[in-house]
Amino acid sequence: MLKKLILFTSTLAISFLSFSFWQNIGQIQASFCQETQNNEMNIVTQADKETEICLIFENKSDTDTVLDINFVDGAITPDGNRACMDPDKAKPNFGQYVLPWEFELEIPANTQKKQIYKIKFPVWYSGISHGCVLYSIKDKEASLWSMRVVFSKSHSIDILVWWVEVKSKIKAQNIALSGDQIYNRIVLNLKNQWNIDQTVNIKWNISNNFGYSEDFEMSGLLLKAGETEWFSSNNLHLPDYKWIFSVKIYVDYQPHFNFHITNQDQKSEYTVPWTISFSKILILWNRFYIISGWVIVILLVIIISKIFKRKR
């Protein structure tokens, strides 16, 4: 009898608590700006393009309300229903591609507020992305023993993403030898001219006619789409007989894909790296030779002027 009484009391308390919190979130309604069936959004877009997700939130209560807004990955269950993934888990197929948004949304009592969010899939993405928008009343949660319960609502978003051509080209803007009188570095300026991040590997050799030769290698570098970046070698302790150096550069690069996506068939077409190579002659003068050269020139001028004076 006592066990039944405890069970009944616990069930009643949980039901009351759930009803109390649900009553609050129940006074908040959200809908997509476009007319949709079952309040589920279907969007067709293209990779590498910003796409809008327009939502209208309505506060039907008599008090101002602050909402927590979250975008998470969704899924289709075996029985064909839509489900939202745990917001505390990774968001590899939808949530991570939503552009930064305000997590908190304040809605005055008995008013509506229109919000536009944006999502942008990487250039190599194609296929269907399932997602959800979750919203809950900020700080409205229940603690049931060791369990934290947040009462929220969700709406499903399905996006068909069309694949676009991946364009890839790295251009070497400049190469130079820089540094002080003790240490020097090879500095290479690369520009990613196209629409996808690149994984870059660099090999270079610096040598001169006096037998000096040194090789360097940098691998796994990331150069983002459309950006220009300087890459620098380790410190070089070049010999004192600094003179004319020849630098040869070899750069190979390939598109940087997020390979945890399992439905991207096109990625296999872009695994072969492209390679560029070039060389440049660099002249680096030692300060001692520069000073010595000027001293010699000055002495020669003095000697020649004295010779002319004697002849006169």
Image (spheres, rainbow, N blue to C red):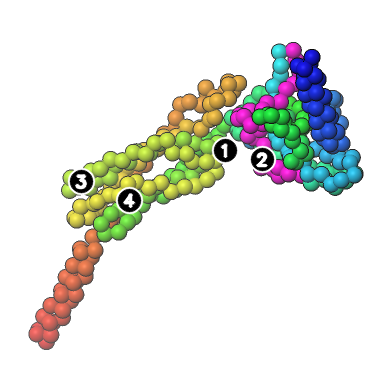
Question: Which secondary structure, mark 2?
Answer: loop
How much space separates mark 2 and mark 3, taking CA atoms?
A: 51 Å
Q: How many marks?
A: 4
User: Which amino acid is tagged 3?
Assistant: Tyr
The answer to whether residue 132 is visible is: yes
Compared with 242, 310 (above or below) is: below
Sequence-earlier tag: 1 or 3: 1
Let me know if residue 87 is in the magenta part: yes
Residue count near mark 1 (Cα–Cα under 10 Å), binned few <14, some 14–19, many ≥20: many
Mark 2 or mark 3, which has the lower sequence index? 2
How far apart are the alpha carbons under marks 4 and 2? 39 Å
Q: Which numbered disc covers residue 212?
A: 3
Q: Which mark identifies residue 99?
A: 2
Q: x and y percent of residue 251 in the render?
A: 40, 38
| Residue type pointed to by label 2 | Leu
- In primary-sequence order, the first of circles 4 and 2 is 2
Gap between marks 1 and 4 measured at Cα: 30 Å
Quarter of the rendering containing residue 150: top right
For the stretch drawn in magenta, the main secondary structure is: loop
The residue under label 1 is 195
